[in-house]
Image (tube, rainbow, N blue to C red):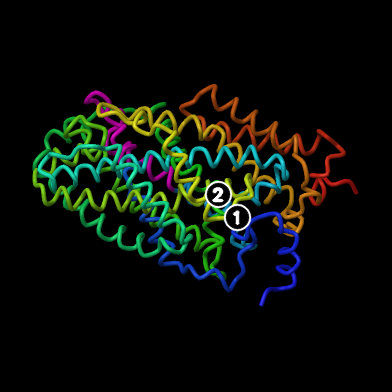
Amino acid sequence: MASLAEEKIQPAAGSLDESLRPKTESSRTLGPVPYMFMWIGDGINLGNMTLGASLVVAGVATLNIWQTFAAAVVAIAIISVVFALNDRLGYRTGIPYVVQLRLSFGVKGSVISSLLRGIPALIWYGFQSWIGGTALNEIAKILSGGSFDNIFLCFIVLQVLQIFLSLYGFHSIKWVETLTSVVIVAALIYVFGVLLSAHGEVIAAKWVRAEGSWGLPFFAFIMVFMGNYAAIFLSAADYSRELRPGIRDSRRGFLYFSPIFIAYGFVLCIGAMLAAATDISNPVKAFALVVDNPYITVFVSAFIVLGAVAVNMVANIIPPTYVITLLTKLKYKPAVVVAGILPLATFPWVLVQDSSAEGLSMFILIYSAFLGPIVSILLVEYYILRRQKVNIEDLYLDDGPFAGFNPCALIAMFLGAGAAFLLVQLAWIIGLTVAGLSYFLLMKFAFPDSPFKRGTIFAKK
């Protein structure tokens, strides 16, 4: 039975699809262990492996092994803290990210900020599917004796499969994540052993013993690591609202750090080793060269396909589906279909060429220049300006206190993004810092009659 607060919210949310309404406690059944497996499954993906491969450009590593892992540990620690901070509103109230945005940006202003989360997710959706399609094509080539070779057709087939799976909602992916996590780790351990035994000297020369840098390239790669997760922890509420109630904030931080550290660190290492051994940045094609056994190649490629599906269903399908639902008023299932078609227009094959994955790294740095400012604004809003006190019912009123748009949030977001582009290698941290400070000062000194100051520490007495 719904609580009194829930009963009030439901009619007020009548213009939104049911998928965007607050999750009730009875509908939140995802436990800590499946939640951790979900993030392991998300971390073990070809996008993260390609980031590892991007360390090796034209046969030269920009960071050596120690610098790589130091950058990864720093980035993952920061990621986990931000995740645990930003997931709290969604965890406590059951609201999704697109509704959380209304708190700072307003009903109309949230359209812009939600698109800045939805569009990168669609591009990642296309990229992961293209990598998965490449792996599916490798399987088809082996099984057909080389007579079939059409990556684009495999890409389309994979999109159709993902659309079908996504129709069953968030919880349909739990079994996929668990299976993928266990089996892909086993497959990667095998590949790790092959790389060490057959290509150890080349990897040591090109990566392990590389001079690397503790300067700007080191800090830039931390930003790339964080930028890779920027979109996910920005929409942390979309995930925490599915998690079973009663889990302490510190424990939720552990639920992020442990699986991301295990998955991210291992996959980055494999990616860098593959690129060093083959000089190819596309991990699927590098796998085919390293593992000179058609049966093992089929096995590894099959779970690369599953990994692409798993990470898309966690990180790249639900968020843009919610955005499409919010903006078009479509029901959940039609919005899932639209979200599955749009990646065809993102041209994912452009981001990663055989010789370099720099296109992917640059894409992450550019879009994270906007996402850093948004997460900073959300954190300042919830923790500093409102002291974690929010009337959730008001967020569902189109003509309530959050109607229209908040100029302070939009100005701060663009100031943060503009500052980030001054030094794109450090875009995320620059944008986050400038936007957070700008938002606080604008809310304090600008637009004195703004309704968005109600309920904040700057409300008129």
Q: Position of residue 393 (x, y in %)?
A: 75, 59
Give me the residue at 73% from left, 53% from top: 395
Quarter of image, res 140: top left
Q: Is residue 246 left or right of residue 404?
A: left
Task: State the quadrant of the N terminus.
Answer: bottom right
Q: Is residue 334 visible?
A: yes
Q: Which of the numbered marks, if any, corresponds to residue 96?
A: 1
Q: Is residue 81 visible?
A: no
Marks 1 and 2 sit apart, C-alpha to C-alpha, by 8 Å
| Mark 1 secondary-structure assignment | loop
Residue at the right extreme? 461
Give the labeled residue for mark 2.
235
Q: Looking at the picture, tell me which residue is in the foreground, 324 or 45.
A: 324
Indicate the amino acid at tag 1: Pro
The residues colored magenta run: 49-76
Mark 2: give few (<14), some (14-19) or many (20+) Cα within 10 Å: many
Q: Looking at the picture, tell me which residue is in the foreground, 155 or 71.
A: 155
Q: Earlier in the sequence, mark 1 or mark 2?
A: 1
Are the two marked residues, 1 and 2, in contact with CB atoms closer than 8 angstroms?
Answer: yes
- Residue 68 falls inside the magenta stretch: yes
